[in-house]
Amino acid sequence: MELKKYLTTIGKLAKEASYGAMCLSTKVKNLALKDMAKSLCAHNSAILKANARDVRAALKKKLPLPLIDRLQLNAKRIRVMADSLAEIATLDDPVGEVLKAWRRPNGLWIHKVRVPIGVIAIIYESRPNVTSDCIGLCVKSGNSVILRGGSEAMHSNLSIYASIKGALKKHRIHEGMVNMVSTCDRKALDVLLRLNEYIDLVMPRGGEGLIKRVMQISRIPVIKHYKGICAVYVDESADVKMAKEVCFNAKVQRPGVCNAMETMLVHRRIAKKFLPSMLADFRKANVEIRGCPYTRRLFKGAKAATQADYRTEFLGLILSVKVVKDVAEATAHINTCGTHHSDSIITEDYRNALSFLRNVDSACVYVNASTRFTDGYQFGMGAEVGISTDKLHARGPMALEELTTYKYMVFGKGQVRTELK
């Protein structure tokens, strides 16, 4: 009962704050965001101390190295977090934007206007930067937010949250606009996901287990930040040098994140020219190769790939490789085995590029670029609350516009309805 009372109090506070949040001026929100960025930097030492405590505990528990990489902060990462908040302050405020306006024959003026969603609960794992990113985006878009981070990052998250709350208080923003669940009790998630009286939207971002659990329990609409089984297809016309650079970056630069390449598809006519040297480079970077029979003939160090491998998000230095006959087969493989997150084609053929863009059913589709760019900050959105692999109500990096809905504002001069239709 105490847990339910605690979370219900947070829900009520957030709901109360949401009505004032939707009316905050752009000026106040921007000033708060700039002070939040300054406060993060000012509390750098405290945040790093809290983070070191989380990392020590993670190492003691022998958590996977990719998770520890996502968990770990340093001065540079905190600086990027602060820069993200400062950039959000420079972006256009979506609240109040008139999407469309028209006059009816009876003289009514109808306006379709962007408004905040209301109260958003964000459930996430391991990455402390999500705390500041989500707070920043929700403040700018006029939403109240309830954050429920993973237990492995609890000290880091609470430290970041504490530093940011002070900036909000300075600008007299309702304390209930930004909330963090401070208990590690697993039952808290069950209670939170049933607070449909107060929460308007739930966004889970994390492992498959977390997503499935949220979907099963929630009484609140959910937008999923699902796993990323991202593919890069090297077409027969690809510039080999470019293909090698893009594929290496997509896999090795940071393998433990959702926009890293997990599958590399290669056209059979370029396979002999491309694969041996590419896979040798991967092996030097300690990437384990799991390939189709043709891949294994070209590169003896490859293990045999199973069908399960092509449907696995490795989040580490493992790569599945498959040789295909054309762009159509590559597209079919991606649509069947991928997770509709981010996929790329490397090609000099305009028609193949266009075919790939049109037919790959993913949130982000690239031509001649790494999938690693699927990120709100990289897209110029300041940050993201997640990357939606759903189709309703948003898709891809979710930032300011995606955190709004709309309502109709109708202006009249005493019109009354007379027809019965």
Image (cartoon, grey):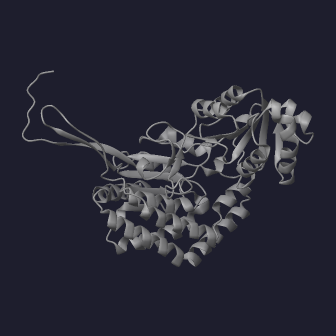
Using the rendered image of the protein, determine whether residue 375 is visible from the camera's viewpoint: yes
Q: In this view of the protein, which residue sits in the foreground, 7 or 269?
A: 269
Figure label count = 0
Position of 52 relative to 296 (above/below) = below
402 or 197: nearer the eye?
Answer: 402
The image quadrant that residue 220 belongs to is top left
User: Which quadrant does the C terminus fall into?
Assistant: top left
Residue 387, image x, y percentages:
54, 47
**Location of residue 78 in the rendering, given as x and y in whole percent from the top left corner:** 58, 69
Residue 52 against residue 112 in the figure, above or below: below
Q: Is residue 196 left or right of residue 351?
A: left
Q: Position of residue 281 (x, y in %)?
A: 85, 50
From this view, report whether residue 233 is shown above or below residue 242.
above
User: Which image quadrant for residue 418?
Assistant: top left
- Residue at image coords 53%, 56%: 185
Q: Is residue 180 visible?
A: no
Q: Is residue 1 left or right of residue 269?
A: left
**Is 278 placed left or right of 38 in the picture?**
right
- Quadrant in which the N terminus is drawn: bottom left
Residue 65 lies left or right of residue 378; in this view the side is right
In which quadrant of the rendered view does residue 337 lie? top right
Query: Residue at image x 65%, y 65%?
Result: 72
Residue 196: where, in percent of width, then height? 37, 45
